[in-house]
Amino acid sequence: MPAIAQVEPLTSTRALRGPFDYRLPEELQRQVGVGSMLLVPFGRREVLGVVVALSESSDIAEEKLLAPLRALALGMPAELVTLAEWIAAEYCSTVARALTLMLAPGTARGAGPLIRLVAGLTTAGRSLADGEPNENQPRLTERQLALLRTLLDGPAVASGLPGGAAALRRLADRGLVELERRAVPRRPTHLPVGVQSAQAPRLTGEQQAVVDELSGVLEQRTSARRLLHGITGSGKTEIYLRLTDETLRQGRGAIVLVPEIALTPQIVGRFIQRFGDTVAVLHSRLSMGERHDEWRRLRAGEARVCVGPRSAVFAPIEKLGLIIVDEEHDASYKHEGDPRYDAREVAQARVQSAGALLLLGSATPRAESYHSLPRMRLARRVDGRPLPRVEVLDMRGANHGLHPRTIAALADVRRAQGKAIVLLNRRGWANFLSCRACGQVWGCPHCDVALVLHRGEGQVACHHCGHREFVPERCECGSAALARHGTGTERVEHDLKAALADDRFEVFRLDADSAGTATPSGGVGALLRDFQAVRSGVLVGTQMVAKGHDFADVQLGVVLDADATLRFPDFRAEERTFALIAQLAGRVGRGGEGHVLIQTIAPRARAITHAADHDSDGFLDGELERRRELRYPPFSHLIRIVVSATAARSARIAAATVHQRLHAPDVTVLGPAPLFRLRGRERQVLVLKVSDRPAAVRLVDKAISTVSRQRSSAGVNFSVDVDPQ
Ligand code: ADP
Ligand code: ZN
Ligand code: ZN
């Protein structure tokens, strides 16, 4: 029996890296394995740790090998420990931080199972409740008899029964009922649990061909990757369902990643409908307890399919056969905290070690996936309808706001009592305020960015740090004349209400502000349901309106200021813009005629002309050519280092020192360059273009550790983002 456990303590301190050796007491040696969770003495504290390896002996002096205090019931599968080590190395983080991602939800805060008093019938109780005649039958009241009968369906939580625990205790005293304290699952009540339906539609020829090929791949049980490049409405979800079914039939489990569940409730519903309790859902809008229990069901093997956002890639499923990433282009798959992992890459690492299939699906795949994965096409919508006609409206020289064609088209929709979606990727009322007299722009006191006007609240807000203040009455120069520049969703909502709304045509707004109060039953979900339910109206919003909803009856889509996203200083700006327009077009004309209008001052931009032609192959081929020339991903990897400090000078010096340490043959370094001040910290940014990513990550890790130990680096923060979004 290995007597030594190598334990990684789960602290977030970067400098402190395990593992540390602990002698296992006799009684723990049998229970503990790689992935077990232990509470261990650490300094003067007791911390949570994960066993990353076991050994017979240790080099550490015997008296220092402290015995662990206690083992927790819920460890993680050993495979996830290996994955955590991979993540730490790949994303320049620590094993402890990576392991923290994989814990059962709420572990750090002591979340555990919900223990309740549960009542069940004894044999005597059962025969009595069944009404079998019995000579020396105890005399019961009508109520007691009724209570026994409700237990005929199976054990139940005592507090939920009439009379409660007291009534049950009296029955237990007479040997009719058994009472036991045990864990009861908290099943998320707002999900359609357990309504299983076998009704799978007949596949189209295109779908069938894809399912056949991928079933063959699953059959081989070796790791493989595919891209499912299917236009919007081509029935990708049905393919996911069939493959999941196939995987379960093989005795293996599946993970289905979706961008944001609040925005795409349909796909979760369809998995639950098809597979019932075999599906566990892990998403942030469930309570901690509910997520904890869903995790336990997966860990225990009761649930074999996990549907959830990015973090569901860590679902504790053993014998994994399939990982699906729906809408693989979505930016939410990249995690913004440390470790800055990309769920699509983690998925790839997982399928490789499990011998599983990774399927990425999208109508607008990333250039990276399009370039490097074997692809399968779905070129037709399931209902046979064509994609909507797209018209580009040139806004050069025009006033901001709505083009006359747009106004006319919206009026047509109202006249026909139909529905429209208007997309503008900027929330608030006006982009920024300036003084007409002296030209001052109202900026955030903590960040060097303009404050956005939110007229409804009479406030201006920083979209980076959340700072808010009331709209100034006058400028410091004394002038009361303020100019408003640019337009946001709040303004468009207001204008459309003024121009079009009546009791037969409603205007809705969906953006991070209107969804701020989002809960599973309210917020985004309710808003979308209201829009779905209303007979006629228009939905205005940010990119949220273009996500995977399946509305049957939207006949007009409008994109305002389509080039807003193009102006982002990011090599993915064109890809994002193309995807946004194509995805919006995908919501339009399902089940009827469709039409899309794009307002832009860059009508010749590649992203816009190709989106208008529904030509994603053409767009991606051109995009790849450009990236090859500029040596951007997938022809290189980028590593972004942000150095920040409250004093500009400290940040500059530290960035320059890091820069000096980054010389290597295959590494190109851009910067350091100043980045706008954020949350009161001055920032400098360095970007590396590299070919050998792991080698470059090691180089960066070493440079930063060295520089951060220097005296001049006191109070300086370093953050590393490998392949940033
Ligand atoms: P995508 O994800 O590719 O945009 P969906 O999976 O949402 O498309 O499918 C669009 C619609 O077509 C859904 O309502 C779905 O139920 C339906 N559907 C999918 N496959 C079939 C089929 N073979 N026969 C009939 N309807 C189908
Ligand atoms: Zn002024
Ligand atoms: Zn700010």
Image (spheres, rainbow, N blue to C red):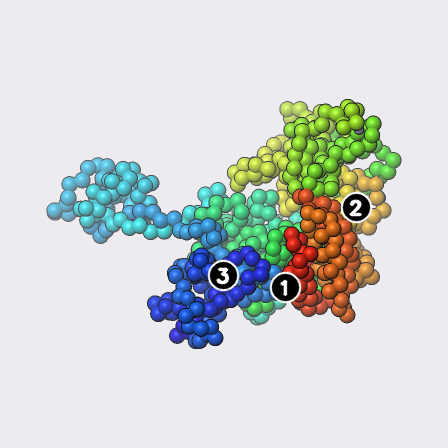
Q: Which secondary structure, mark 1?
A: helix
Q: Three-letter amino acid code at disc 1?
A: Glu
Which class describes the residues within 10 Å of circle 3: few (<14), some (14-19), or many (20+)?
many
Q: Is mark 2 within 8 Å of ligand 3?
A: no
Which image quadrant for residue 413?
Answer: top right
Q: Residue at x 65, y 41 (%)?
A: 465
Image height of 712 relative to 555, above or below:
below
Upstream in the sequence, badge 3 or badge 1? 3
* Dot 3 amino acid type: Pro
Percent position (x, y) of residue 669?
A: 77, 61
Q: Which residue is mark 1?
A: 90
- In the picture provided, is 59 more to the left or to the right than 238? left
User: In the rendered view, does 55 fall on the left or right side of 386?
Assistant: left
Instruction: Point out the frontmost of discs 2 and 3.
Output: 3
Identify the residue at image location x=82%, y=28%.
436
Q: Any mark on residue 9, and which? A: 3
Residue 588, visible in the rendered structure: no
Q: Name the residue located 65 percent from the left edge and 45 percent from the top edge.
A: 547
Q: Secondary structure at mark 2?
A: helix
Dot 2: within a 10 Å radius of its alpha carbon, few (fewer than 14), some, or many (20 or more) residues? few
Instruction: For marks 3 and 1, give the one nearer the viewer.
Output: 3
Q: CA–CA distance between discs 1 and 2?
A: 31 Å
Query: Disc 2 designates what residue?
Result: 567
Mark 2 to mark 3 CA distance (whole Å): 45 Å
Picture quarter containing residue 244?
bottom right
Residue at (56, 54) in percent of width and height: 311
Q: Which class describes the residues within 10 Å of circle 1: few (<14), some (14-19), or many (20+)? A: many
Q: Position of residue 316 (x, y in %)?
A: 49, 60
On the image, the x and y values in percent for residue 184 come to 37, 49
Determine the residue located farthest toward the left in the rendered image.
136
Q: Amino acid at mark 2?
A: Arg
